[in-house]
Image (cartoon, rainbow, N blue to C red):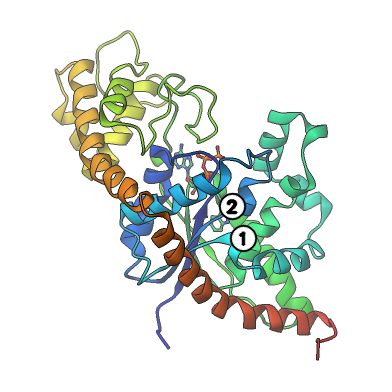
Amino acid sequence: MSTKATLFSGMAPSADSLQIGNYIGALQQWVEMQDTYNAIFCVVDLHAITVPQDPKTLAASTRTTAAQYIAAGIDPEQSILFVQSHVSAHTELAWILNTITGFGEASRMTQFKDKAAKQGTEAASLGLFAYPTLMAADILLYDATAVPVGDDQRQHIELTRDLGGRFNSRFGETFKLPEAVIMKETARIYDLQNPEAKMSKTSVSDSGVIWMMDEPSKTAKKIKSAVTDDDREIRFDRGAKPGVSNLLTILSAFTSTPMPELEASFAGRGYGDLKSTVADAVVATFEPMRARALELLSDPAELDRILSRNAARAEELAKPKLATVYERVGLLPRS
Ligand code: ATP
Ligand code: LTN
């Protein structure tokens, strides 16, 4: 048995590509952490359908997301990389967790409130309401203690700890409690056209989103058209200069350069210069990843075999844990 701690994380295949915020906020850390942990990376397709999905594109988005994990450097032989709906223990544990989750505490989840408000609260589904208990099941099933996510997910990890602790005290010690591994607030990426709003896969405007699967020329063009401001100084100040600060954050993440050093190197230079430097850095990283993802997608049967093998590896870990949970809860074993 390896003595490494377990890491679990995932992203929803809610679009036909990941965007740069997913990379900086999550994927980049995953790749760095996969050697230190027993790492499990999931494409959370059941989370994707908590808002209305297009059945014609979901399977393709699921494959593309998995291909992008691999293209960014996740090794599916070393780490476990699988699709959530392939391992039924996730929804089975989520149901058990639903039964110990308060209506009130679920109602306080800010992601639910935001996503429900987007579609009109009356139209929000029970699935969207239960999103956090499915996420808790993802993590608790594997006794994952490290969960690298962007800071918008902090509240869900707290809930996961509460539910794991509650289950342990009611039914006996069963789950390890996870910690969020969160990048600094400065690592949050904003929409290029509206730098007050978080960039996301389901953003309304395409021109404000840098997709990892965009053609390099398109990426460069979007960065060069990013909204900045009227003065000319290049410094990090989210309040006064959200557009410039966003570009600096991206550059800092792609070149591993601390912010003060970046600011100093841009003293006396113009916004055009900053934008070209950012565009070059992003394209240099994303172009080979895009090529690798396209190559993987050109052989979907092989990609599906990788995902199937990895689902079996995940299931082997998840099944005994679910059996313990069923027994502790008092369900009659099937003989
Ligand atoms: P959706 O629009 O479907 O909610 P999203 O692009 O906002 O998608 P998620 O799938 O919710 O992203 O998140 C996947 C991971 O990427 C999470 O760890 C999240 O914190 C991180 N993330 C998403 N957007 C950003 C962003 N703009 N900046 C930093 N991290 C981000
Ligand atoms: N809600 C997460 C995606 C997610 C996840 C998880 C992340 C689903 N299950 C388990 C970490 C661990 C998000 O990033 N939006």
Amino acid type for the residue under numbered disc 2: Asp
Residue at label 1? 85
- Seen from the viewer's position, the closer of residues 284 and 265 is 284
Quarter the C terminus occupies = bottom right
Check disc 2 and report the residue beneath it.
45
* Distance CA(mark 2)–CA(mark 1): 6 Å
Please name the residue shown 16% across and 30% down the image.
Answer: 264
**Furthest residue toward top:** 230
In the rendered view, tell whether residue 108 sits above or below residue 191. below
Secondary structure category for the residue under label 2: helix
Question: Is the CB atom of the residue marked by disc 2 within 8 angstroms of ligand 2's nearest atom?
Answer: no
Q: Image quadrant of residue 317?
A: bottom right
Give the quadrant of residue 241: top left
Label 1: state its secondary structure: helix
Name the residue located 61 percent from the left edge and 68 percent from the top edge. Answer: 87
Task: Give left or right: position of 97 versus 73.
Answer: right
Residue 40 tag number: none
